[in-house]
C-alpha cells in the first residue's frame, strides 16, 4: 500500500497547491489552514473570505457523502470501498476542473461560479480525508503532512541516537520507511500542481483525475481477484 499512499499524498499536495494559487489562497485538502487565511482576510490582509468560509461546509459535505455511500453500499472488502471512494473523488475533481475552466480568469472572489469551484475542490478532498477513516487498510495519513513530519523526525532521532533499544530502532525504521515516501510525494505534488497551473490553468486537474481513475480500477481489480480466489477456495472444499 506504500505506492498507493504516495500517489494519494501527491494528489493532495497537487490539488491543495493548485487551489491555493488559483483561488486566492484557498486550501482544499488542508482545510483547517483556511482559519488562518480567514483571520488575515478579516484584518484586511487578503481577499476571498466568503470563498474560504464556504470551503468548510463543502469539505464536510464530502465527508458526509463518503460515509453515506459506504453505509448504503456496504462494501464487502476494503478494495471495493476504496474503488467507490476513488470514483466519487474523481468525479468531484473533474467537476472542479470543468467549473474552473469556465471561470478562468478568476478575478472576482464573490462570483457564484468561483465559490462553487472552490466548494467542489474542498468536497473532493473531503472524500480523500474521509477515505482512510471509512476504509480499513494499512497506510499513513496522506493529506496533511504535519504529523508525518513530526513522527519522521522523532523516528530519525531514535535510529541515530545511542539510547533507544534495538527493537525501538527497528520499529522506528519501519515507520520512517512508510512515512517518508508520502512526505516526499506530497512535496513533489505541490510543486507539480503550481507548475501545471501556470502552464494549463485548471486543465491541470485532469492529471489527478486520471490518477484517481487508475486507483479506482486497480482497487476494483484487486477486489475481483480476491472474490475469485475466495470462490475457488469455497468450491475446492
Image (cartoon, rainbow, N blue to C red):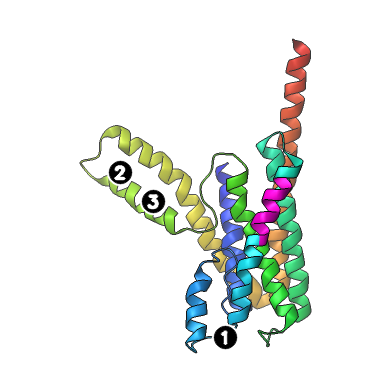
Q: Quadrant location of residue 149?
A: bottom left
Of residues 105 and 59, the one nearer the viewer is 59
> Spatial distance from mark 2 to mark 3, Cα to Cα?
10 Å
Give the extent of the magenta segment: 61-70
Q: Residue at x 73, y 22 (%)?
A: 230
Q: Secondary structure at mark 1?
A: loop
Write down the residue under mark 1. Answer: 47
* Cβ atoms at labels 2 and 1 below 8 Å apart: no
Of residues 81 and 153, the one nearer the viewer is 81
Tell me the quadrant of the picture where the N terminus can be found: top right
- Name the spot of residue 93 as percent of width and height, x first: 72, 63
Q: Secondary structure at mark 3?
A: helix
Q: Which mark is residue 159?
A: 2
- Name the spot of residue 122 as percent of width and height, x first: 64, 66
**Which is closer to the viewer, label 2 or label 1?**
1
**Which is closer to the viewer, label 1 or label 3?**
1
Q: Residue at x 66, y 66 (%)?
A: 58
- Name the spot of residue 27 as percent of width and height, x first: 57, 70
Write down the residue under mark 3. Answer: 152
Amino acid at each position: 500500500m506504500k505506492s498507493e499512499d504516495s500517489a494519494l499524498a501527491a494528489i493532495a499536495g497537487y490539488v491543495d497547491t493548485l487551489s491555493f494559487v488559483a483561488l486566492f489562497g484557498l486550501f482544499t485538502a488542508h482545510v483547517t489552514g483556511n482559519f488562518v487565511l480567514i483571520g488575515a482576510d478579516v484584518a484586511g490582509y487578503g481577499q476571498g473570505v466568503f470563498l474560504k468560509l464556504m470551503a468548510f461546509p463543502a469539505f464536510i459535505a464530502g465527508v458526509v457523502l463518503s460515509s453515506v455511500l459506504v453505509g448504503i453500499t456496504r462494501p464487502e472488502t476494503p478494495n471495493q470501498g476504496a474503488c467507490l471512494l476513488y470514483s466519487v473523488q474523481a468525479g468531484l475533481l473533474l467537476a472542479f476542473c470543468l467549473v474552473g475552466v469556465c471561470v478562468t480568469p478568476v478575478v472576482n472572489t464573490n462570483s457564484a461560479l468561483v465559490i462553487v469551484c472552490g466548494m467542489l475542490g474542498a468536497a473532493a478532498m473531503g472524500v480523500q480525508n474521509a477515505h482512510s477513516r471509512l476504509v480499513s487498510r494499512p497506510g499513513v495519513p496522506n493529506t496533511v503532512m504535519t504529523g508525518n513530519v513530526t513522527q519522521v523526525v522523532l523516528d530519525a532521532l531514535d535510529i541515530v541516537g545511542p539510547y533507544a533499544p534495538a527493537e525501538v530502532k527497528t520499529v522506528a525504521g519501519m515507520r520512517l520507511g512508510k512515512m517518508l515516501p508520502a512526505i516526499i510525494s506530497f512535496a513533489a505534488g505541490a510543486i507539480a500542481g503550481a507548475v501545471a497551473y501556470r502552464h494549463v490553468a485548471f486543465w491541470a486537474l485532469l492529471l489527478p483525475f486520471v490518477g484517481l481513475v487508475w486507483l479506482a480500477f486497480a482497487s476494483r481489480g484487486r477486489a475481483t481477484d480476491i472474490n475469485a480466489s475466495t470462490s475457488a477456495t469455497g468450491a475446492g472444499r
